[in-house]
Amino acid sequence: MALPKERITVDEYERIIAAAENANRRLELINGEIIEKMPTQLHALIVHLINGFLFVFLREHPAAWAFPEARYQLPEDPDNSFIPDISVVRREGKTITEQGAATYMPDLAIEVQSPGQGDKFMLDKAWMYLNRGTKMVWIVYPEKRVVEVLTPTERHLLTVNHTLTGGDILPGFTLAIREIFPSD
């Protein structure tokens, strides 16, 4: 099925993603436009590594859940249905959505840049998360081997010589940036 080029609503998006021919496609709705996610092996490996470190941490500190490729759609936002590469949701006051999109935003959204996704696209998407209630966003730039950490009030660029922390969302979580980039 060809994806529409014009702006669409969440209702139209729901119809498109429910179609059998789109069952194995990763389709996001961003500003009324369907964006197909096309991850590479490197992208998948970085997502897998980060999610693995989160899994181990959250087994010992079960205050949150980590979800690869979960969908979030605020009822009052008819133009967006987000699918972060990884999302972290604090358990307090939340339940796991069993059908459709979660109707709240994740506390932490993690996006790994894929080929074809420019830096501006990644940053714009991060601000969309933050403006809708996400407390922290990590943007991973595989080619540059850096991670950008954004909150509503701060922005930091971390290199392979730095350590990523979970802040107030995941107190005690640390991850050396070099651990998420495969060495040659």
Image (tube, rainbow, N blue to C red):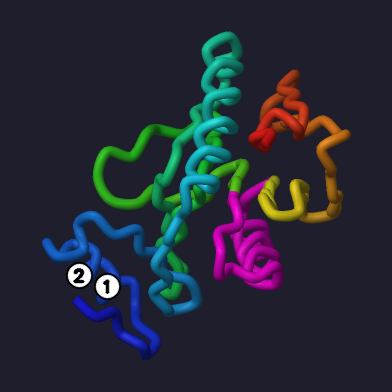
Q: Say if the magenta span includes residue 125.
A: yes
Q: Do the CB atoms of the residues marked 2 and 1 lie less than 8 Å apart? A: yes
Q: x, y (%) of residue 22?
A: 21, 63
Q: x, y (%) of residue 154?
A: 85, 52
Q: x, y (%) of residue 112?
A: 59, 51
Left or right of 178 in this view: 84 = left
Task: Read off the residue under disc 2.
Answer: 15
Residue neighbourhood size for the residue with mark 2, other residues' Cα within 10 Å, grouped as few (<14), some (14–19), many (≥20): few
Pick the quarter of the image with the C terminus. Answer: top right
Q: Is residue 107 above or below residue 30?
A: above
State the CA–CA distance, disc 2 to disc 1.
6 Å
Residue in front for this viewpoint, 48 or 138: 48
Considering every residue shown, the one lying at the far bottom of the view is 6
Q: Residue at x 42, y 58 (%)?
A: 73
Pick the quarter of the image with the N terminus. Answer: bottom left
- Residue 167 visible to an observer of this rendering: no
